[in-house]
Amino acid sequence: MRKQFRDLASPEEARETIASLELTPEVERVPLSDARGRILAERVDAEIDVPGFDRASMDGYAVRARDTFGADEADPVELALAGEVHAGAEPDVEVEPGTAVEISTGAVMPPGADAVVIVERTEERDGNLVVYKAVAPGDSVMPAGTDIAAGARALGPGTRITPREIGLLSALGIDDVPVRGAPVVGIVSTGDELVRPGETLRPEAGQIYDVNSYTIAAGVEEAGGVPKLYPHAGDDYDEMERLLREAADECDLVLSSGSTSASAVDVIYRVVEERGELLLHGVSVKPGKPMLVGTLGEGSAYIGLPGYPVSALTIFRTFVAPAIRDAAGREEPQTATVEGSMAVRERYAEGRTRLMPVGLIADGDGEMLVYPVDKGSGATTSLVEADGVVEVPADVEYLAEGETVTVQLFSVDVRPPALLGVGEDDPALSRLLDRVPSPRYLAVGSREGLRRLRDGIPDVVVVAGDARSDGNAVELGSWTREWGLVVPTDNPAGVTGLGDLVDADLRFINRDTNSGLRTELGNAIATLADERGQTRHELVEAIDGFDRGMKAFESPARAVLAGRADVGLGLRETAESLGLGFVSLGTQPVHVLGNPDRTQKESVQQFGEILADGDDVFGTLSGYESK
Amino acid sequence: MRKQFRDLASPEEARETIASLELTPEVERVPLSDARGRILAERVDAEIDVPGFDRASMDGYAVRARDTFGADEADPVELALAGEVHAGAEPDVEVEPGTAVEISTGAVMPPGADAVVIVERTEERDGNLVVYKAVAPGDSVMPAGTDIAAGARALGPGTRITPREIGLLSALGIDDVPVRGAPVVGIVSTGDELVRPGETLRPEAGQIYDVNSYTIAAGVEEAGGVPKLYPHAGDDYDEMERLLREAADECDLVLSSGSTSASAVDVIYRVVEERGELLLHGVSVKPGKPMLVGTLGEGSAYIGLPGYPVSALTIFRTFVAPAIRDAAGREEPQTATVEGSMAVRERYAEGRTRLMPVGLIADGDGEMLVYPVDKGSGATTSLVEADGVVEVPADVEYLAEGETVTVQLFSVDVRPPALLGVGEDDPALSRLLDRVPSPRYLAVGSREGLRRLRDGIPDVVVVAGDARSDGNAVELGSWTREWGLVVPTDNPAGVTGLGDLVDADLRFINRDTNSGLRTELGNAIATLADERGQTRHELVEAIDGFDRGMKAFESPARAVLAGRADVGLGLRETAESLGLGFVSLGTQPVHVLGNPDRTQKESVQQFGEILADGDDVFGTLSGYESK
């Protein structure tokens, strides 16, 4: 049954195949108040004149111009006063030959009149009007249709409706606007282990939250489509099949991502083959190789996206969003791409197109630097570490440092961060970053942070302990934090210091090797080894779990809280905030170092000021002191 | 009662006063599916580990690493097989010392195990597992929290939520997102003569459609506010006062525009003074001098905008939108400004800041030209003729041709037109323009069109009749149209030709002097005058209404239809489409001429092709022929 696609399609073939899908929805009519951002489906000609009546443009008297011929200061004309007309009222009087009617600005010209004599050129005398100036037909009258004439072309098809077009439609009295329909895009979630955000997660059963459904839904909305999330069927494959059929009936396009289980893939194949046709299976692009494209019968299509979040968003942005925009009649926003230069050399030679997720940061001169992130780890955090994607053609072997590249942003709303920091994680730092506009902070640890500073990418690096940059990094600020052993509440094992960790039978959880906290622990162990006349290695060997290093500052403490460990490496602040016991082993400094090439950058200077003013942050945290 | 503000405030004072208004709304919580485009109000730290469990990253066997120490191909270790664990399932077995458990990628590590031996390095034998390789603790295991660790800083306050942030929030299971509230902006409509679009208009009573309410509402929405339109009170001032109080209670900001009637202004003053304070009355800026700023008591403010649509949108965009964006926590979109150079010299010396509405068009080299539009005419059509505003400081006397200026677009969604045409209006042209992507066409008439071409601004000019450019304009295409006298159905006055117009007592409606149709009529009258041995002037004088010239091609015919005239100048096509009678006076050519500096511009070449392929358009219109 299953078709064999021996060759991967090229990215161009994939684009063409997706462009060939029939996604364009019917024309809709929406109320004027909902028309902003939509695309006009048809030409709108004016059906009425604006203004819709001959309008006096001055205060004065409506007359028949012929009656004033020859009038001047020396030889005025006298007309009988026949009544008056005010703005916003219907005239109840006609201007017969030899008569005049008082009129105010904006009022409707009464029948018979073809001009207005301004009040300054007249005089009322004995119930009559004396006119001191001749007027021509049309004088001080704005004829009906002067602003917009009935029959005139007002707006063309394809016009994007912004506030100004709303204004023109208002003037024409149109409150029911024909617009391009928005394609309905169904999102079917296919992983057995996925749970929707907001629902209860059972990690002990291997469940994880569904990242792609809402991410892709937001992308669909941004591209001008209407996302429709179908309930999650879990491992009920009959229900999944029913949902897919329902989605195919209701939607212009159905998307799913990362069907890891063979059973789920089979369900999708079955529905695609039964109702439509599989057009493409596999694309020569990284990520996205397993992309699936097909039809689901009359007016509906299917695209299967990869499972890793960054890969799913990358493929969506590169291949699917353009098709949704086309169907909705939208142009790609101008700000959706950014030019920049590669901050590092990046090698790549796998013979297929690469969609490389990248981050962006301005250097000291305001030039945009581009650096690769997420080398296929599948990490969700890469989502917010990447600003967009650089498309590297299959025949390019490397991108040189300084080479200019074009970055397709993940969203028109994505802004590169104002400040890029890397290094140690720390609760005081988390709070200080709240005061920085648009920061990005990658908690890669002190050691990895210093390495990245040498690459010249980050603006600042945060280093815990005495480790220092070998360059001439500029210190922007520093503080000290109290560190030690986090133990269960009331310290049931009676841990008093590092010696117990070595001597007693305790399950320990460490930090990872990039952490400045682990370096500090290593130093303390070395000191203890000296005191005991043993080697550092001997002591480390005696600690059960010294090599179980965790990435984040709260993780060892949380393992203690969950009963998975007896002792964790951590901070007094963490222990206290989680209600755990704490055995202090000392304090360590945390230094914020500025990239020497960025000291003049506004955000770096601003961060320096925020650090200097951070006493209120340090004051509310246990074991912290500003230096 | 009414405060006197003798001096106009400077634009800077107006900005400061508006910035001082308290518009910032409360934090809201929205479902994840509605969070796109909103601004995160608080820092979001991870509350859970992602993944939430130690996860096997390869297919193999979960073991205690210590049990494999020393194992190699020559000296394997044998362990007892104790069961299996699959992805998405909770382990029901523990790994005791000396045992192993079969495990698949993504599955939860069973208790007791600290590493996975990959399947390739093992062999099952007699219900036991033979392990050919020693593993270290953590091998082929992704520990809980590797992707995101509980306690880690995930997103900072002020983060704009785009699809990627939706992804991170999903991963953390957050479906209830704290976001900056959107300021509620009430729009109160105050003109007596205004009618809401969609309602019935009584032009005979001087009514016009309300343009500003929906335009400003769309602008509010675009700036991140929530617009709230209040019902139109017409000339019921008690009701208007009640609505203003209601709006002040319900909204963070209340806007109205162009209260022309003194009574409406009094109502506004009364409510502002009673509940709050008038802060500013009049700003030294053109347009917008009558701008009013005040408070309406606790947490609500009032701004009065000018009445002309372009002026209202200009003042909104310049002064009000930034305050709404600030309150909503949004940045100004990057594409909201464009650099360009002045296409013409523009003088201005009124001693106050000018907010000059301008149009934009790319020249032949792709450089953006900026030209002024709408010199205070108040025309609604200027709304769609202007792309944005150039702020000219009070002390600048003129902008030189070629001078670089910054244009604040009316909306981030505004795109300069791809093709700018000017000249004659024509029904065939209206249809042909539907085929051009993003055209702007200003129906200023043939004569004015040629004048503008001499200024070098438009890409093309459309000229009816034999009038030709004095430059070296390039003809892109042409057609002929049949013109003559439009008369009521069945021609009750028995008009047979131009002679009747001169001789009989008929009310005539002409086109305006810029129209090529009027020039054609003038030529025909001159010929008739020659034939009769009279002067052209004598004949013109004998036509009642020769000087009543209307701006648009359908207008004279519509006047005939409405009984306001007996004869109108027009086209056979117009007469037939409106079901009127027609007396032919001949055919005239219509030429589309290209600006000689823009012949290589893509949109100009494209338009040329569309003209060449336009036979289907000419074929469906009466009296048309392509040439």
Image (tube, coloured by chain):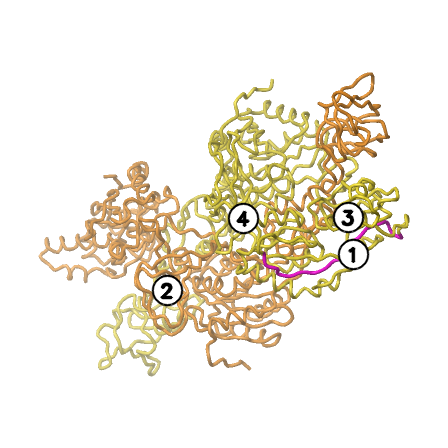
Chain colours: A yellow, B orange
> What is the span of residues highlighted in magenta in the rendered image?
A473-490
Q: Residues within 10 Å of mark 1 (few under 14, many from 20)?
A: some
Give the spatial CA distance, label 1 vs label 3: 15 Å
Give the spatial CA distance, label 2 vs label 1: 76 Å
Name the spot of residue A605 as percent of width and height, x first. 57, 62
Q: Chain of mark 2?
A: B
Residue located beneath label 1 in the image: A586
Question: Which kind of residue does numbered mark 1 sit on?
Answer: Gly
Give the spatial CA distance, label 1 vs label 4: 38 Å
* Residue closest to the eye, A464 or B439: A464
* Vertical side of A259 occupied by A578: above or below: below
Same chain for the residues under marks 2 and 3 in the image: no
* Vertical side of B561 occupied by A610: above or below: below
Residue located beneath label 4 in the image: A360
Please state which of the two labelled residues, at mark 1 or mark 4, is closer to the viewer: 1
Residue located beneath label 3 in the image: A526
